[in-house]
Image (tube, rainbow, N blue to C red):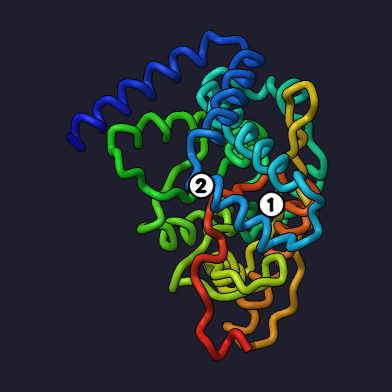
Amino acid sequence: MRRLRFLFEGLAFGALVRAARIMPRRWLLATGSLAGYLGYWLDPRHRRVGADNLKLAFGDELVPGEARRIQRACWRHFGRITLDALGFPRLDACATGRVVHYEGLEHLRAAYEKGRGVLLFSGHFGHWELTALMQGYLGYPLVLVTRPLDNRRLEPLLARLRGGSGNRIVHKRDAVREMLRALREKIGVAIVIDQDARDGGIFVPFFDRPASTTPTLGLLAVRTGAAVLPTFSVPNPDGSYRIVYEPEVTWQPSGDRDTDVLELTATCTAIIEKWVRRHPELWLWMHRRWKTRPPRDERG
């Protein structure tokens, strides 16, 4: 049954990609929004996770009904970007000014001009896959760190979508070696750092709560001296996206690697929180961000 399910998923995914190539993008976005709205009502388990996370993050800050509004908007958003990603083969460098609009490109160029490689970070916020794809068309291709899918039939299909602009895909099990190689070659590395890292993470504040966070970004920055650059994307009313590159994150080495990694990770996580507070409907509330608890002596 597992093999049959994987076969069906592969055939369905391929059919969706072919349909996305011919469907007008506004139809694709509308269909995705509807699919996300249906998902909200058909998936009570993740709806409860989202409600719990919003309560943990905002407490009593949200007026009655606001949490439900954010959740519904969140599901519609993730439905839109999921189907929109299926249409990536239609995009090229000419999509700049039509599908994407940029702010802060001077920060991107300055980071690359330093010649030490660039670590671009974001979260599961906005349209992070579109941001990575379009950066390749800007002439700054990336190494993308992804988790291998359970269904191996989907891997090559998804890799073609993500790598159409020259980006290279590496899986987490091979990630550190490949990221170090990319930085030595002065290539950018893209990493999202906003998911629960379980026992392999370090605890930094996220919405004033300790959250297990991957130390990979901080470790690579401390080890290589690569520039650390935040990037985020926000949808516009016409269906296009505003992609923002913020100034490079600056930090001063203390001589203690663990301290530097912790402080840099906390700084970058705080930047993600800033964007989530601005646009809460664009973040993945359905993920159990605070699932891993710190040891008792770290809780105070």
**In front of the other: 127 or 208:** 208
Q: Residue at x 54, y 31 (%)?
A: 82
The residue tagged with tag 2: helix, strand or loop?
helix
Which residue is at 65% across, 88% downward?
A: 255
The amino acid marked with disc number 1 is: Tyr
Regarding residue 118, the answer to whether it shows in the image is no
Which mark is on residue 46? 2
Q: Secondary structure at mark 1?
A: helix
The front one of 255 and 292 is 292
Quarter of the figure with the N terminus: top left
Residue drawn at x 80%, y 25% is 237
> Percent from the top left, x then y, of residue 221?
61, 68
- Quadrant in the rendering for residue 26: top right
Q: Which residue is mark 1?
A: 112
Marks 1 and 2: in contact by CB < 8 Å? no
- The amino acid at mark 2 is His
Please say if 230 is above or below 14: below
For discs 2 and 1, the disc positioned in front in the rendered view: 2
Residue 115, percent across and down?
A: 66, 57
Which circle's residue, 2 or 1, is located before the other in the chain?
Answer: 2
